[in-house]
Amino acid sequence: MSFGSIPALAPPLQRAALIIAAGCCLAEGALAQAAGGDAVSMPLASTMEDVVSPKPTTGSVEVGVAGAHLSDGLQHWTEGYALGHFSPASGTVLHWSVASQRHFGETGTVGALSVVYDFSPDWYGLVGISGATASFQNRYRLDAGAFRKWGEERRWVTGLAFMHAASGDHIHHDNALRATLLYYAPAGWTGEAGVSVNRSSPGSVTSTRAFIAGTVGQVGQRTVALRLEHGQEGYLPVAAGLDLPADVRFRSTEATLQWRQWVTRRWGYVLGTQLYRNPYYHRAGLQIGIFMDF
């Protein structure tokens, strides 16, 4: 499996002007990720009010649906999701999500909760947990990360995150480490890059993946985010009983594009698309959702 997350679980980091489509950390839209496992997404920015305008809201709720067409005669994917975040206190943000997914002919429910906390003006951390019911999802997943802001205006952010997951097939386990670099440009765009190393068992399979992402636009008006990810996956999670090759350390590529449009100051819609390719099948998906800030 990959370190990435089901995009439906990705927290909308609106106050940081960064819309992760996956894990993906759900960067991270609602388009299911390559591995198809549930996850708690890794927010890559904490309080950035001194960098990004306009002034952030205290929370947000989003609901939506997604679907994907798979090649090679595999059944289509469908998904309905709800996610959100709110700040109960200064420097603390809670992210939550729940989704019902039908992948490879099996239906499962996944829920996730994560907390981002500012330790100081320069340091913040994250802890998260998620659980799910289907064999193609992670039975449970734990995440923890530490992030450091750099520079006089704190426009650079580096991060290191750890993930442990147990697959819903009751066989596979994963441990992964991800390093990330994030930059908030004065012109208003955001750039991000990262690399992850994953160790899967049984078999002690090591796989690596890398990604780049960028977001342009202004929170409260419109943002457009693009994410590209390529690398290895330790194994291929599928629904129980599905006959697919049991290959390990295969390569896959994923591209996600998401458009987030504010219709008023408080609510808007999100549209997304995703393309994924591995040696065994291709996937093309669409997402639509509505959100409300408060």
Image: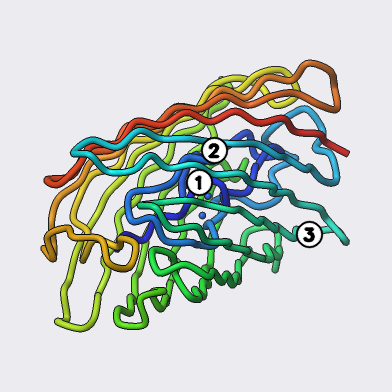
Question: From mark 3 to mark 1, how far is it between C-alphas?
Answer: 24 Å
- Look at the picture and state if 9 lies above or below 147: above
Label located before the other in sequence (2 or 3): 2
Closer to viewer: mark 2 or mark 3: 2
Question: From mark 1 to mark 2, how far is it between C-alphas?
Answer: 5 Å
* Left or right, 275 with reference to 206: right
Residue identifier under label 1: 7
Q: Position of residue 158 (x, y in %)?
A: 46, 55
Residue 91: mark: 3
Nearer the observer, 289 or 244 = 244
Q: State the image quarter where residue 196 is shown.
A: bottom left
Q: Are marks 1 and 2 in contact (CB under 8 Å)?
A: yes
Residue identifier under label 2: 29
- Look at the picture and state if 199 lies above or below 64: below
Label located before the other in sequence (3 or 1): 1
* Left or right, 122 with reference to 184: right
Task: Tell me which amino acid carries mark 1.
Answer: Pro
Nearer the observer, 25 or 105 = 105
Q: Are marks 2 and 3 in contact (CB under 8 Å)?
A: no
